[in-house]
Image (spheres, rainbow, N blue to C red):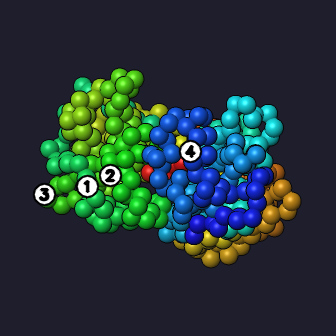
Amino acid sequence: MPREFEPSWEDGIRSVHLDEFDSLDRLISDVFFPGLFERQPHVFTPENAGNLRVVVKDGEVVSHIGTIRRQAVIYGCPISVASLGGVATYESQRGHGYATALFEDTMRVCREDGVDIILVSGYRKMYHRLGCRYIGKDWAFEIQADQANTFDDGLEVTAASEADIADLMRVYRFEPVRWVRPPADYAQMIDGWAMNRPARTFLVKDGGHLRSFVVLQVPGEGDDGRVRVLDFAGDRVCLAGALGRLVKDQGLQGMDLHVMGHDRLFGDVLRERGLEGKPVSTSGTMLVIHFAQLMERMRPYFEEVLGEAAKGLVFEEQGDQMIFGYGGDRVVAENRGTAAQIIFGTLDDAEARLLDAGGQAGEVLRKVFPIPGLWCGVNYV
């Protein structure tokens, strides 16, 4: 649920007030570009005002960090997630520590509200210092224009409309790692904005039946005919067999596609058609907020993998340390950043040393970790 804004403060660090939206719009337009405020209605809306943390000085919003809150499902386990972005401070107001104070304030309210993890849309030294880390063992693929025929199986590919939202929701609901998206999220991706880019959604049908969908970046000036797939769901063979049609129909020179590490089927399908993937991290950075709570929420998955042995897993927070225990042995993360690396994995296996030194605890954790992160897609801030 959206967090209620604090009604009584005038200046200071707090959530934005409804009569300050014009002031916040001016800040966002100055730091990013005019129009972004309107292009992210899932963020800058009165219903989300309590999650828009601001510094107000002399009645003017001078610094901002925003989140949206969603539930997500990882292998059947529901968790609570905040997606964070819109980090902005007027140039004339920088150097006062406003962004750091807002980020720490956001961490505080997210923990109070039971949020398990925060997905941050970028990377700064400040984020790293506060525990954000690159995570994931994903793959980046590229389809060139001269490969389009290899990815065109003659399927029906058409633009989606708001009349298709219920069908899009049904397709997405079968994803093993997914956000719990309200209808408004789907309306936004139909012909709107995703991953900070103009976006349009396409349906992929086989024999008249909807099999999958693709959220594609709308090409613009400076893109040189290359666009990104911003989100997708559904049958992976049909997805691969529709990408070439999109390349041709949209007159593209190339298409970039990010495949999460857990999505081995899609990776295999793309490789079978001649692509070579490049190892990459998941988009943005990850911040663990509620370590023990997150682990307990993932326990049904641990039980599925480990059986009775999962009962021996113990999770504790002691000061800054986050501890994974099993059979009297421990894997100790010195801070929340290291915990994120252990749980979600990293490209350079930064977590390996700690798992190797963890005895039985490390051995058991290797069987359940890494768990997948989340691709923001239309839930990007």
Residue wearing tag 1: 161
- Regarding residue 253, the answer to whether it shows in the image is yes
- Residue beneath disc 4: 25
C-beta proximity under 8 Å, tags 1 and 2:
yes
Give the labeled residue for mark 2. Answer: 190
Q: What residue appears at the point 76 percent right and 46 percent down from the top-left corner?
A: 58
Q: Nearer the viewer, mark 4 or mark 3?
A: 4
Picture residue at 68% right of the left edge, 61% below the top: 110
Which residue is identified by label 3? 207
Question: Real-space Cα distance between discs 4 and 1?
Answer: 29 Å
Indicate left or right for 258 with 250 as reference: right
Q: Which numbered mark, 3 or 2, is in the foreground of this view?
A: 2
Amino acid at dot 1: Ser
Please say whether residue 352 is visible from this viewpoint. Answer: no
Q: Nearer the viewer, residue 73 or 150?
A: 73
Q: Secondary structure at mark 2?
A: helix
> Looking at the image, is 74 positioned above or below residue 43?
below
Q: Dot 4: what SS?
A: helix
**Residue lying furthest right in this view?**
319
Q: Secondary structure at mark 3?
A: loop
Q: Mark 3 and mark 2: span between their CA atoms?
A: 23 Å
Around disc 2, counting alpha carbons within 10 Å, would you say few (fewer than 14), some (14 to 19), or many (20 or more)?
many
Decide: few, some or many residues near mark 4? Use Cα within 10 Å; few <14, some 14-19, many ≥20. some
Closer to viewer: mark 3 or mark 1: 1
What amino acid does circle 4 point to?
Asp
Image depth: mark 4 or mark 2 in front: 4
Where on the picture, by quarter, is residue 172? bottom left
- Give the vertical position of 236 relative to 34 (above or below): below
